[in-house]
Amino acid sequence: MRKLFVLICALSILTGCVKKAPDAAAASQTAYEGYYKAIEENTKYESATPYYTVSGEMAGQPDGTYRYYIILDQAQIAMYDIAMLAVENGTPYAEAHKMMPNIGIYDSAEFNMIPYQTYADGGYVKGIVISGESAETSVDLELMVEWTDKNHEQYRRQFLHYVIDAEKGMYNPDAAEEEVTEETEEGSGAQNEG
């Protein structure tokens, strides 16, 4: 009888753990979908941010594909509970056949960045890296970065747009268009004077 009681207790503990895992997974999936749809619905991207730096690179792989990396670091303000998601080439959520690069959505750990302070074991990191794979030498990324203050009272969300190219590196295509427009306007003004 005692063995049966111990077995029933053990099974109820295991069953309790199994029930919690799907709930956590479902909550993470709902958050991922919500962030993805926020990127899809966003119409304005910031060309730069004063809060941190973003850089990226792309490296060729032996199988002929490419792996790209997006690095968020050098925090200028305290950022807590950071979440980041990058959507490749404007792929709609309904057509995405793979999970897009992300952090802070499915992770049980919290990622925090404070200027000039790191303590990785406590969740205070120097920087964050997400990565993805591409069959092409260039990938167009719509990026969302979200964080909160220390007390989780005020949230901040930024949308950024970058292209990472194996040859050109990482650049903001919107800023490149602005530069071309400015150069064209300056050039046409000079022609009118002459």
Image (spheres, grey):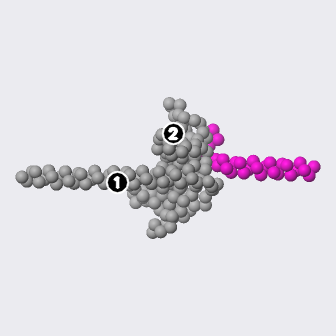
Residue 156 drawn at (x, y percent): 53, 62
Question: What amino acid is at disc 1?
Answer: Asp
Other-residue count near label 1 (Cα within 10 Å), few / some / many at <14 / 14–19 / ≥20:
few
Q: CA distance from mark 1 to mark 2?
A: 29 Å
Q: Is residue 83 magenta?
A: no
Q: Residue at x 86, y 52 (%)?
A: 189
For numbered disc 1, what is the local secondary structure? Answer: helix
Residue 133 bears which disc, if any?
Answer: 2
Q: Is residue 183 magenta?
A: yes
Other-residue count near label 2 (Cα within 10 Å), few / some / many at <14 / 14–19 / ≥20:
some
Residue 130 drawn at (x, y percent): 49, 48
Residue 173 lies left or right of residue 127; in this view the side is right
Residue 38 lies left or right of residue 179; in this view the side is left
Q: In the displayed orientation, state which residue is furthest to the front.
A: 94
Q: Residue at x 22, y 54 (%)?
A: 13
Question: What amino acid is at disc 2?
Answer: Glu
For numbered disc 2, what is the local secondary structure? Answer: strand
Residue 44 drawn at (x, y percent): 63, 55
Looking at the image, is 21 positioned above or below residue 122?
A: above
Residue 106 drawn at (x, y percent): 41, 51
The answer to whether residue 129 is visible is no
Q: Nearer the viewer, mark 1 or mark 2?
A: 1
Relative to the observer, which residue lies in front, 92 or 8? 92
Label 1 vs 2, first from the N-terminus = 1
Q: Residue at x 24, y 51 (%)?
A: 15
Q: Which residue is mark 1?
A: 23
Relative to the observer, which residue lies in front, 177 or 22? 22
Which residues are drawn in magenta? 167-194
Q: Main secondary structure of the magenta part?
A: helix
